[in-house]
Amino acid sequence: MLSNYLIGLREGLEATLVVVILVAYLVKSDRRHLLPRIWAGVAAAVLVSLAFGAALTFGPRGLTFEAQEAIGGTLSIVAVGFVTWMIFWMARSARGLSAELKGAVDRAADASRYSMVVVAMLAVGREGLETALFIWAATQAAATENGSTTAPLTGALLGLLTAVALGYLMYKGTLKLNLSKFFMWTGAFLILVAGGVLSYGIHDLQEAGILPGLHAVAFDVSGTIRPTSFIGTLLKGTFNFSPVTTWFEAIAWVAYVVPVMTIFLLKVTGGGKNAAPSAPSTSLKVAA
C-alpha cells in the first residue's frame, strides 16, 4: 500500500503540475475562455488512462495460466522501462517544462479550437498511461501473496488525491514545495520499487516457462521473514521483496538497481561530468 501511495503521489504530482502550468498560464494571459478546452483534454486523458488500466486488468482473464504469466511478466518489464525513462526525463527537463508547455499553448491558441484539447490530452495522457501501467504492475506484484488488490489500489488512489490537493495549494500560492528534492527522493524510491517489479516480472516469465531457473533459488529467508508477518508484508508491499528469490530474479534486481541508482544520483546531485540542470531550488514556477 505504501509503495502504491508514493507511486500515485509522485506520478500524480507530475500530471497535476502540467495541469497547473496550463491553467495558470491561460489565466495570467487573460485567456480564460480557453479553460474549458483544457479541462476537456484533461478529462479525455483520465478516461483513456482508466480504460488502459481496465484493459490491463481484465484483458488477460480467460487465458491460460502460462499466457497470463507471460503477459504480466512482459508488461511489468515494459513498465519498469517507462518509469525509468520518466525518472530521468523529469530530472533533465523539470527546469524547461513550464516554458515548453507555454509554447505549446500559444501555438494551439492560434490553431483550430480542438488543438488546445489535444495539447492538454497529450500532456496529461502521457503521465496517465505511464501511471496506469506502473500502478497495475506494482499492484500485481504486491497482491502475489493474498490475491487482494484492495489495499494497493487504495494506496494509489490516496496518493493521486494527495497530489491533486498539493497541486491545488501550489496553484493558489499557499504551498511551496521543493520539487528538486521531492523528485530526487521519490525518484530514488521509485528505482527501488521498479527493481522489485522487475524481479516480479522475471518470476512471471519463469512461471510461464519462457525463462529458465524457476527452482534455482538464490536465497530462502521465509523461515526468518514470514510472508504473512508484519515485516514480510511491509517489505512486500513497499519493495516487492520476496523471501524466496531465484538466481535470475536476484541478478536482474542487482543489474538494474545498482547502475540505474548510481547514474541517477550522479545526475541529480551534480556528481557526474554531464550532470543534468537541476530544477529551481524552491519550487517549480507554475505561474507566468
Image (spheres, helix red, strand yellow):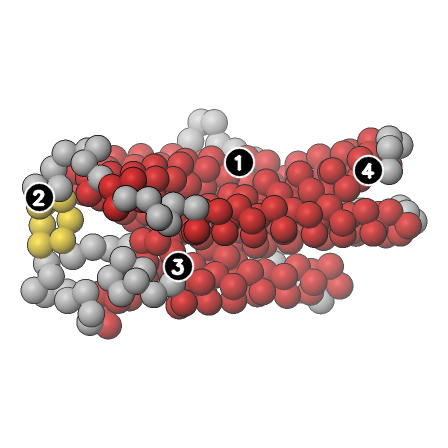
Pointer 1 local density, CA inside 10 Å: few below 14, some 14–19, many at least 20: few
Could you give the CA–CA distance between mark 2 and mark 1, rounded to whole angstroms? 38 Å
Cβ atoms under marks 1 and 4 closer than 8 Å: no
Cβ atoms under marks 3 and 4 closer than 8 Å: no
Could you give the CA–CA distance between mark 3 and mark 4, rounded to whole angstroms? 37 Å
Q: Secondary structure at mark 4?
A: loop
Q: Secondary structure at mark 3?
A: helix
* Occupied quadrant, residue 145: bottom left
What type is the residue that disc 1 sits on? Answer: Trp
- Residue 114 tag number: 4
Residue marked by disc 3: 3
Disc on the earlier residue, 3 or 1:
3
Disc on the earlier residue, 2 or 4:
4
What type is the residue that disc 4 sits on? Answer: Tyr
Could you give the CA–CA distance between mark 1 and mark 4, rounded to whole angstroms? 28 Å
- Residue 89 tag number: 1
Pointer 2 local density, CA inside 10 Å: few below 14, some 14–19, many at least 20: few
Q: Residue furthest front?
A: 62
